[in-house]
Image: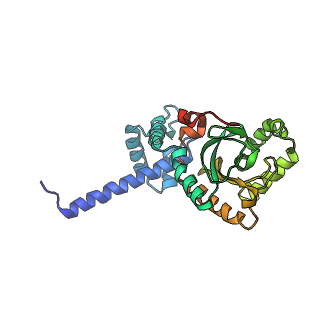
Amino acid sequence: MKIPAAVKTDIDEAASSSVGRAFAIIRALAETQAKGGRVTQLAKATGLTQATTHRLLQSLAAERIVEQDAQSRLYRLSIDFFALAARAGDSMDLRALCRPSLLRLCASLGDTIFLLVRSGFDAVCLDRTEGPFPIRSFTGDIGGRVALGVGQGGMAILALLAEAEREEVIRFNLPRVREFGVLDEVYLRTEIENVRQLGYAGRNTGLLEGMAGVAVPILDREGRAVAALSVGTISSRLSPDRLPTVVELLKREAAAIGARLNPFDATLRRPAQSLTPRDGPAAD
């Protein structure tokens, strides 16, 4: 039997409305995930009636998107929901996501571009595109690592960590950065404040003679630094006149990447595992 067009439209609109309400509840649950949410709380947060909220929660529970604690009766997003999101993110990891940005920046600027990702107390070079000028860097080739706070990329990440986490990294890394001879705690904290105010790390420390660089952090949706885009070049190519242009291009690409980051991307937790054998050994 053919369904009349008017009836079909009503059915489609009802289905669309139900989907929208279900996602409103999912978003409200995401905000209360730590403690869990009651029907009354979720109804107030979504503007739905308690009856509609309860019905949709039961439907989501039947699909194993939502779970209810047997004792507290509080609702939370289920483990299955997070597992589903994790599988969905497997199609494009951070390295694949950033590759077009690295190519665009290299073509626009004519310099070597690095993608650094945070790994514990270090920054790891996850990818790079080579410019025409021979340069040296702290991380060397893909897979190389350096202590957070050393080099523009490592500094850009360190500066935008949450305060308590940043303090722990500084405490642990301070003896490591002192090995470079000209870096101390005063310098480190001064540079961190500069990066937080300016949004980029770009001072030439003189640690690599004749080299200069500038880096911007890549922030997740919570505003936490997980990676950095960095330009490495010879000092004469990063003049005060050219610096704003370089920073603007880096910030534009970093913002675009941050908006598309998958929080379940395994690269953000275990960057070394995303490096394939073809990348070759790390160069420090």
Q: How far across and down, in percent of the image, does residue 104 sit? A: 55, 57
Q: Is residue 241 above or below residue 230?
A: below
Q: Is residue 27 above or below residue 8?
A: above
Q: How far across and down, in percent of the image, does residue 218 sit? A: 63, 51
Q: How far across and down, in percent of the image, does residue 66 sit? A: 45, 40
Numbered disc total: 0
Q: How far across and down, in percent of the image, does residue 67 sit? A: 46, 37
Q: Residue at x 21, y 61 (%)?
A: 7
Q: Quadrant of the N terminus?
A: bottom left
Q: Quadrant of the C terminus?
A: top right
Residue sticking out furthest to the bottom: 241
Q: Nearer the viewer, residue 164 or 186?
A: 186
Q: Is residue 191 above or below residue 69?
A: below
Q: Nearer the viewer, residue 71 or 109?
A: 109
Q: Residue at x 17, y 57 (%)?
A: 3
Residue 126, quarter of picture: top right
Asked if residue 266 lies left or right of residue 216, the reply is left
Q: Residue at x 70, y 54 (%)?
A: 233
How has the structure been colored for display?
rainbow
Residue sticking out furthest to the left: 1
Residue 61, quarter of picture: top left
Q: Nearer the viewer, residue 189 or 115?
A: 115
